[in-house]
Image: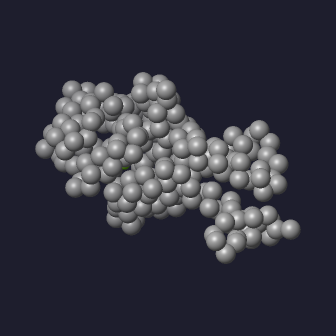
Amino acid sequence: MLQPGVLLDRDGILNPDVGYPHRVEDAVLFPDAAPALRMLQQAGFSLAVVSNQSGVARGYFGADDLRAFNASLAEQLTAQDVAISVEQFFVCTHAPAEGCGCRKPRPGLIHQAADRLQLDLRRSILIGDRESDIQAGHGAGLRTVLVDRHGSAGPTSADWICRTLIEAATKITRDSSASTPMAHQIRGEFLESAGLRLSAAQIQRLWSLSASECHEVVGELVATGFLRRTSDGNFVRRA
Ligand SMILES: [Mg+2]
Ligand SMILES: [Zn+2]
């Protein structure tokens, strides 16, 4: 069965982005990395790292350095009870000019991870610190979180913006309890019972709504006068 996944950028998300980090001494986790990944894993998400590493093609470091760096991060995470191996790190080593399909903002790495780890992309989430990460996520149909640790990110198309990885994990796990097929089915039945006729495409769309998006939909229906809130907190169709 396909699992929901959280796909994480590496540099700037798990470890500081010191500019083509590749020396094992620079493979230092942010303090919130292991707790955040543990939280996501406990909520049922498979984990994958998706990382552009053009430093290989540029000749700044070798594929062995890259693998040793990733293995060091994986070991440190494992030591803090995150079940992750270096096989869950997916990297593009190409230069921009090579025009490969795996360099973000293209979605190739995400598809590689999804194939290998049997991920359900409709229920998966991308976490990155650059707009190119976010675009790759959207290209693969994922919801996206921009982690802006320094409050310095420019304009973004991300669905959510957080200041830390732990804040992102908290938001995702809180939302995911409302993203189960059962929750979606209940919402669909609720809307139908309220007299909304839904096309197959609309039902499909409903299934990919997060809890916050669902609140938005209900909010709109209230704002447009289709629904009203009762004193006990339920919503009923306006007569
Ligand atoms: Mg990054
Ligand atoms: Zn590539």
Q: Residue furthest front?
A: 232
Percent x, y for residue 12?
Answer: 32, 51
Q: Residue furthest right?
A: 239
Q: Residue furthest top?
A: 116
Q: Residue at x 38, y 53 (%)?
A: 169
Instruction: State the colouring used for the structure image.
Output: one colour
Left or right: where does residue 76 sit relative to residue 170?
left
Left or right: where does residue 187 sit relative to residue 142?
right
Q: Residue at x 49, y 29 (%)?
A: 2
Which residue is nearer to you in this view: 65 or 171?
A: 171
Left or right: where does residue 198 sit relative to residue 60?
right
Q: How many callouts does the rendering have?
A: 0
Percent x, y for residue 136?
Answer: 51, 41
Left or right: where does residue 115 sit relative to residue 149?
right
Q: Residue at x 29, y 46 (%)?
A: 38
In the rendered image, which quarter is residue 109 located in?
top left
Q: In the rendered view, would you say 69 is above or below 174?
A: above
Q: Residue at x 41, y 27 (%)?
A: 117
Q: Residue furthest left?
A: 25
Q: In the rendered view, would you say 82 is above or below 148?
A: above
Percent x, y for residue 128?
Answer: 41, 49
The answer to whether residue 50 is seen in the rendering is no
- In which quadrant will I find the C terminus? bottom right
Q: In the rendered view, would you say 41 is above or below 145?
A: above
The answer to whether residue 46 is seen in the rendering is yes
Percent x, y for residue 196?
Answer: 81, 53
